[in-house]
Amino acid sequence: MADIVATPKSHAQGDHHDVDYLHDGSLMSWMTTVDHKKLGVMYLWSILFMFFLGGVFALLVRLELIAPGRTIMDAEQYNKAFTLHGAIMVFLFIIPSIPAALGNFALPLMLGAKDVAFPRLNLASFWIYVTGALIATTAMFTGGVDTGWTFYTPYSTTTDGPVALMTFAAFVLGFSSILTGVNFIATVHKLRAPGMGWFKMPLFVWGIYSTAIIQVLATPVLAITLLLLIMERAFGVGVFDPKLGGDPVLFQHFFWFYSHPAVYIMILPGMAIISEVVPTMSQKVFFGYKATAFSSVAIAIVSFVVWGHHMFTSGQSQLAGAIFSFLTFLVGIPSAIKVFNWITTMYKGSVSLAAPMLYALMFLILFGIGGLTGIFLGTLSVDIHLHDTYFVVAHFHYVMMGSTVIAFLAGLHYWWPKMFGRMYNEGAARIGAILVFVGFNTTFLPQFLLGSRGMPRRYYNYLPEFQFLHQVSTVGSWILGLGFLIMAGYLFASLRKPFDAPSNPWHARTLDWQTSSPPITHNFHETPVLKQGPYDFFKPFEPSVEGYHE
Amino acid sequence: MNWFREWMMPVAASEHAIKVDDLYMFIFWLMLAFFILICYLTVVFALKYRRKKEGVLTVNFSHNLALELAWSIIPLILVIGIFFWGFNDYVSAFVAPNDAIEIHVTGSKWKWAFEYPDGTRSIKKLHVPINKPVRLIMTSEDVLHAFFIPSLRIKTDVIPGRYVDMSFTATVPGRHQVFCAEYCGKDHSDMMAEVYVDTPEQYDIFLKEGPEELRTMPLVELGKFTYDEAGCKSCHSLDGTEGEGPSFKGLWGRSEKLRDGSSVTVDENYIRESILNPSAKVVAGYEPVMPTFQGLLRERQITGMIEYLKTLK
């Protein structure tokens, strides 16, 4: 295991006797904490539970599709299963995953701050998230919803089931997202350590900052849209249903005005983690720091004007289609720049292949596929054929899961020693990573072919000619599931050990590592004063926290 | 590489489909080249610069203007080229020639219905003449659907309360699959249809006599087929269960009391009249809610229905 840097346990505490943040483990101390680290950990367990739940629905959907016709459930149950898979994964898992869990934990540490700008607001967003999750769970257990996670009208305003409750859950969850965004923006502006100018910030901070801007600006539009939907269902106010004088396509404009930027709420934090893991694990200065920082902001801005590319077949005007197609291609360029920057960062580095880097390398390949297949879908004439087929399903799973979730796993393995003070079993982590990689590709690569051959998405039943590829995909989902099972195993196992993680196992230069593992309650003994940039691996390490040494 | 193209896509049944495939394959090879580049550099850098010794300092290689401009501008030029290519094919596909045959398409949960310029109607089976431009004028009766013909590479959402159109000129004769591509509830995945690209002679016969099975099926079988396809079964049961209309079980030859007090014997002419002009003689105890099937059923289907009813003792 030459790739793992095993430095002895930190002596960062020096003569101080502050306790680590995990020391007070009483239930009340967790439930009422305003410590960003504890809130990050609580978010982490919540979203991991939601990931598990959404994953179970995914496996059920894949199992049903192993053969045409009924396998384990009927059409109505299937429609509910894929709706819940999508809604849980999007609203309860991916959107809060990196910002709320890892961001909450790492952002203030990286800035050299004691906490976020508004710690009580942070606690409020957590409990709003929990409330939203409980409302969503209630909707699931009182009949379930069969609208798809997109709630397209007029189907969603006319179908049976607790649709209003489910959309209300998404409405509530939106507030959690907005408040977290506001908090992070204020934190980045006001709580940077002395000496940390904007271009001395770690790129993770740039990514989370860009994400927070989208969260604050776009989420209210979703809230309004869902409220209108609830009004139409509950009081017959005609907004979207043509029978009531409404316009069903209007809903799609509203919905995607939020949900396309939301795609970047999901991917930007993933890119942010990769921008952290790649230079640190390569011990190499980041190539194109400013280009990457500005790319994040550019993506955040352009993401607001590409929503119509979800609607090329919706009957919107051809001119609108052309404009959206053009802008969609433009948003691809900053993403391409980032990929080349990450790869070039490894050049002449000292690359460790420990678990976080394995996931980062997987990200480069899977995001490559996810991004490049987006070119097919941005192209008007080709998208008309591929729209609403499995090609789209495969594409967004490569971006959402192959990129965001894989980046989340890179971040989880990267910060795990800092969060819990323990190292996980590296050998098991590598086996898990390989299974996840193989399982993921086996599941989703065949779906591109299914789609280009014409297999529509959200199909319970299908023609026999598609069966072989569906079977390959289902088998892939089992391999993927096994990979996650192994991961759960070694991560939980690590928590049973005493603290054994060094304070800076990856030899990082950012401030989050210049404190003990796990960090003390107030993060740092002394306020850090930035002595060197986040990726200055070309010169010897100079701690920014007085008294800290490795 | 034709086999590869055919492996990736269904048969290309129009000029437009071939153009879409040309662009698809162009993008495919270009993206594959980029993907191989990404994989190659990722793997080579990860292995070549793999950590051999701890605690080494690395070079300060943090930017290179020429390199950064190259990988910004080259992809930009390529995607702008792809944009115009795709835009061009998209727009030309949407312009229907003036002499296009206009066929109305109605989507409803969960079937497709077609109406031709001469008033001929069909369900689930769309007949179009080969090499003639066709314009589909489409609407939905309930929720969103999407009319998707993979082998023509076209699809359009079908929306309640408005018309959308879609044009094509099919060049490959025979049967082509149609899917509903916009999620519409329980039987979304069974909301399929077929496009039959006919020779001019076949198309004329279709307009005159209806789809082929109506011409060749034995009468009783045709009656059963019509009973299922035309929607009789939603109101008239076969087992004596009461519905919106009288059950067909044991109906033949019976004397029925009508709403106006008179009575009628169920014979060939009564059945024929009830199909074509259902409100003329409504059986007592039922509402005159049945729609006419004038123009919807062929002569032979009506005969088939009569023969089928005779078998339902």
Image: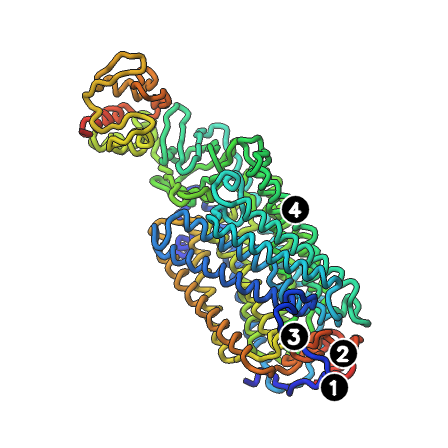
Query: Which residue bears the numbered disc 1?
Result: A14
Instruction: Give the residue pinned by disc 4.
Output: A221
- Give the mark nearest the N terminus, 3 or 4: 3
- Would residue B47 be visible to someone looking at this image? no
Question: In front of the other: label 1 or label 4?
Answer: 1
Callouts 2 and 3 close, C-beta under 8 Å: no
Chain letter for the residue marked with disc 2 in the picture: A
Looking at the image, which residue is at 47% across and 76% down? A431
Q: Which type of secondary structure does the marked residue at label 1 adopt?
A: loop
Q: Is disc 1 in the same subunit as disc 4?
A: yes
What amino acid type is highlighted by mark number 2?
Answer: His
Q: In this view, does A182 lie to the left or right of B282?
A: right
Please say if A210 is above or below A170. Answer: below
> Does label 1 or label 3 sit earlier along the sequence?
1
Res. A78 visible in picture: yes
Q: At label 1, which amino acid type do we have?
A: Gly
- Give the residue number, with chain letter if any, for mark 2: A525
Q: Position of residue A228 (x, y in %)?
A: 61, 40
Label 4's element? helix
Image position, residue A133 (x, y; %): 57, 56
Is disc 2 placed on a helix, strand or loop?
loop
The kind of residue tagged 4 is: Val
Label placed on residue A24: 3
- Distance of label 1 from label 3 (alpha carbons): 21 Å
Q: Which amino acid does label 3 sit on?
A: Asp
